[in-house]
Amino acid sequence: MVGTVKFNIAKISGKLATLMAKWGPGSGGTYPGHIFTRIAGEDGISKLASDLKIGSVLITGTNGKTTTTTLLIKLMSNDIQIRRSYENNILNSIVTALINQKGDLGIFEYGIRNLTYGIPDTVQRLINPIGVVYTTISQEHTQVAGVKNPFEDYYKAKKLLSQGMKRGVVVTNADDPRTALIGLDKSADVSVNYYGIEADGIEDIGCDAIECPKCGEILNYSKHFLNHRGIYECGCGFKRPEPNVKLTDAEFNQDSWKLTIEGDLFNYTVSKNIKFNLDLTVPPFGLHNIYNTLASITAYATFTPKVENIESTVKQVFNNLDMSFIPPGRFEVVDIGGKYVGLGQGDNGDAIKINAMFMKQYVDGPLEFIYTTPEEDEEEIFEDHFEVVKSMNPAHVIVVPGRKSIDKAREYYEIIKKEYPDAEFYPLSYDEMDTRIERLSEMARNSEYDYVIMTGCGEEQAMWERIKRNLIDN
């Protein structure tokens, strides 16, 4: 155990380092956490985390982490003071928040790409969370630090974030077989609250057949909601668990959506089951954000100490929601003089399909697809991307390298050209980002089509946000 004097010196040093740190989104950087850890070591991190009266909640998954974390922060901040960190997905960002913020509960986004860099079991041991929230798990970036990683290792890394938990609650997506199995495997050690969809009239654009995460056989789906999320079962006995929080009805209008959500779950802070019913009116923000809504509401109802506020707080937050809750650089549709341009990151098949489904709400005529490609050794991602490109039935396709390799982007383009002979290729250099951003902005602005979608791989957040600002400001 770290000594008191050493621990206090580490905290003071971390706070002083804050004055020199460049504050970023969410936690405001990682340098103070780095300085603290250098002095106090791992025992110091555990002591910091144990100072939280209620504990810490970690949010992870392939997609929806930041949005779910942002929504959870909006909800929980109405009830108690919290410490928070989002977008900076490393341990030092959590430590920085623990040093510089006040509050009884920590809400921390924690993205994990692989076992080596994500250190999920170490994070779980040091932070000792009372909750881990899973959004969804799908094929992610196959390269980290130039090394191609098997999906099995990526999935294992996500599981490790909660595997060592002996207290608290796992909040997880019942509709995703991979996250559902994590919950089922942890149910002997901790409580598990599932969320999912049980409403008619929700259709996916194409269906993904995936292997059962328990036995490896192909799952049998009776309904698909979004990619591999749906109602499923396997001959081995594995099947979708019953959601504790579920969307039971949805009415989709052009200007707003009406959602009915029912909940019956275990609340950790009061140690009893609670029920609630919600009728919400939200912006038409896409099916993926219905899942983020369910995840954040489930996590909030699981960990708030003020259970009597659940219905009123959720209604107040979501019935007054504007699109500013979407993190910078994520997929958005902007209207530029009557032309609708949808743009944002879509690094994997799940993400790009979400973008396409969101864009489909606006399309009422011929569409141009400006596609930014994956890197070398990311053929699986390209295959998923290409299926989504075809599902949009574009009148015209433009292909641009989304990563560094122009040669690999050209190979992807040649495959696309067989399906779309009029497709065009622009070999824009990743190293000349300013030129790339300006050229992509021009393509969208000067397109002859009234509906344009620009998505795929690219520099996360910054590139997409700058293109959006170029389109809006000009």
Image (spheres, grey):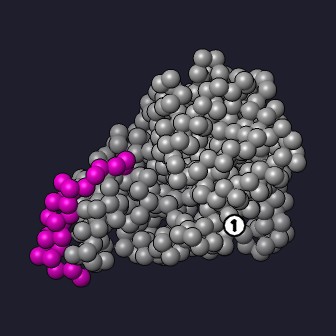
x and y percent of residue 228 in the render?
74, 55
| Amino acid bearing label 1 | Asp
User: Which residue is at the front of the view, 422 or 75?
Assistant: 422
| Label 1 neighbour load within 10 Å: few <14, some 14-19, many 20+ | few
- What element does badge 1 sit on? loop
Residue at 36 percent of width and 73 percent of height: 126
Q: Is residue 105 left or right of residue 283?
A: left
Q: Nearer the viewer, residue 62 or 380?
A: 380
Residue 295, visible in the rendered structure: no
Residue 458 coordinates in the image, percent (x, y): 58, 50
**Residue 264 shown in magenta:** no
What residue would you read off at disc 1? 377
Using the image as rendered, state which of residue 291 and residue 315 is in the foreground. Answer: 291
Relative side of 144 to 218, left or right: left
Q: State which region is magenta.
A: 1-26
Dominant secondary-structure state across the stretch colored magenta: helix
Residue depicted at x 38% and y 66%: 91
Q: Is residue 80 left or right of residue 268?
A: left
Residue farthest top in this picture: 337
Q: Is residue 85 above or below residue 369?
A: below
Query: In which quadrant of the rendered view does residue 7 lie?
Result: bottom left
Report x, y in % for residue 434: 49, 42
Query: Does residue 248 sit above or below 21 in this rendering?
Result: above
In which quadrant of the rendered view does residue 368 lie?
Answer: top right
Decide: is 373 above or below 279.
below
Residue at image position (78%, 23%) is 365
| Residue appearing at x 50%, y 60% in the figure | 111
The picture quadrant where one finds residue 440 is: top right
